[in-house]
Image: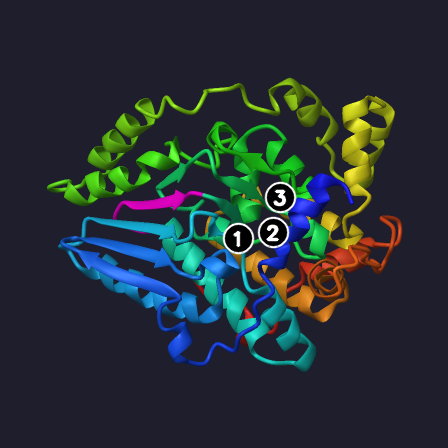
Amino acid sequence: MHRPVRRLCVMFNHLRVAVPYSTTSQMVDEVILQRIQDCGVITLNRPKSLNALNLSMIRKIMPQMTEWEKDPAMNLVIIKGTGGKAFCAGGDIIAVTEAGKLGGDLAKDFFREEYILNNKIGTYKIPFVAFIDGITMGGGVGLSVHGQYRVATERTVFAMPETGIGLFPDVGGGYFLPRLGGKLGVFLALTGYRLKGRDVQKAGVATHFIQSSKMQALEEALLKLPDPKSRDVARTLDRFQTESTDIPDTDFSLRDHMGEINRLFDGDTVEQIFENLRKEGSEWSLKQLEELKKKSPVSMKITLQLLLEGQHKTLQEDLQVEYRLSQHCMEDKDFYEGVRALLKDKDNKPVWNPATLAGVTREHVNWYFSPLPPDRELKL
């Protein structure tokens, strides 16, 4: 197995926990919620699962954030993860797909409540700082990228690899990815390319880069701000970024390929992008083409349409569309097959249905975007 694929499988495999979300003593501290003076601190505390997000965690975070937001004395909220390896490597998708097979409510509730939390973060009325130190994928992106400040470190690994498991870059991916500039978001969404360290900031996913050895001091400095308005938080983050000189400031890893990305991934259909890459014929373009051929054809088509439409939508409008997509994914086949191949059987040989782009009709794509019954639509 090629090294990038092997690494991706390792990260996905950490998301295999399928613990029921009923209350148990073992789950009491999955997420730690603290009030320190007039600041809130949310700590994701499932290090053995790379802080993968489950429904019980969402149901603890959301009401606490709502309560803090209503408190006029609250000045700042920080979210971080434990363990040193990940901020949050994604959602508990094994549990979701297992429930989906049985027709359980988890498949409906998880996506609905996760997206409501994503919207809360995106519209939060007090400064919100996410420490995306370590692996940040899927659900972890939703907990951070819509917030006012996102702090990456040299240990940060950002990816939206959902097309490889028969899903799509959700948690607001249809909103933030088209806004990264050019066709970078389309490239990241279709290929699942991983950004590391300073690249996460250079791409526009993070607002700041601070070396991991300074993160504890940064948190202490933020908590000590006498009256942390947004400008004071920004100045503190800027200062720590300026002082993060132990990590070399290298060029953006995709700098030499941005011209190709903007040209070759500029298409109204996935077929057009495939043809662009094939005609280009360079070593780099053919490598991207081979990577795309591994992805779910359905996922790639709904992902491209999501991003093309999302560039003109608000976050709320995009999340409502994404909820429709999530529920139709639960009714179709590829999401279950992708999870089986990468997470359960781990043969890394998904059998997509349909197996080709030509087999994915316009009618099938339109069905994914079709409204749900009124009582099942996402309400924000």
Query: What residue sits right under mark 2 in the picture?
Result: 11
- Looking at the rendered structure, the secondary structure element under dot 1 is loop
Does the CB distance between marks 1 and 2 fall below 8 Å?
A: yes
Whether the magenta-drawn stretch holds residue 129 is answered as: yes
Quadrant location of the C terminus in the rendered image: bottom left
Looking at the rendering, the stretch of residues picked out in magenta corresponds to 124-133
Query: What residue sits right under mark 1 in the picture?
Result: 89
Residue 290 horizontal side relative to residue 199, left or right: right
Q: Earlier in the sequence, mark 3 or mark 2?
A: 2
x then y, percent, for residue 218: 27, 38
x then y, percent, for residue 305: 68, 46
Query: What residue sits right under mark 3 in the picture?
Result: 307
* Residue at far left of view: 226
- Looking at the rendered structure, the secondary structure element under dot 3 is helix
Q: Amino acid at mark 3?
A: Leu
Q: Earlier in the sequence, mark 3 or mark 1?
A: 1
The answer to whether residue 52 is visible is: no
Residue at image position (29%, 62%) is: 33
From the viewer's perspective, is the residue at label 3 or at label 1 nearer? Answer: 1
Q: CA distance from mark 3 to mark 2?
A: 25 Å
Q: Amino acid at mark 2?
A: Met
Q: Where is residue 334, by image quadrant? A: bottom right
Q: Is residue 367 above or below residue 128?
A: below
Q: Residues within 10 Å of mark 3 (few under 14, many from 20)?
A: many
Quadrant location of the N terminus in the rendered image: top right
The answer to whether residue 196 is visible is: yes
Residue at image position (60%, 46%) is: 160
x then y, percent, for residue 338: 73, 59
Q: Amino acid at mark 1?
A: Ala
Q: CA distance from mark 1 to mark 2?
A: 7 Å
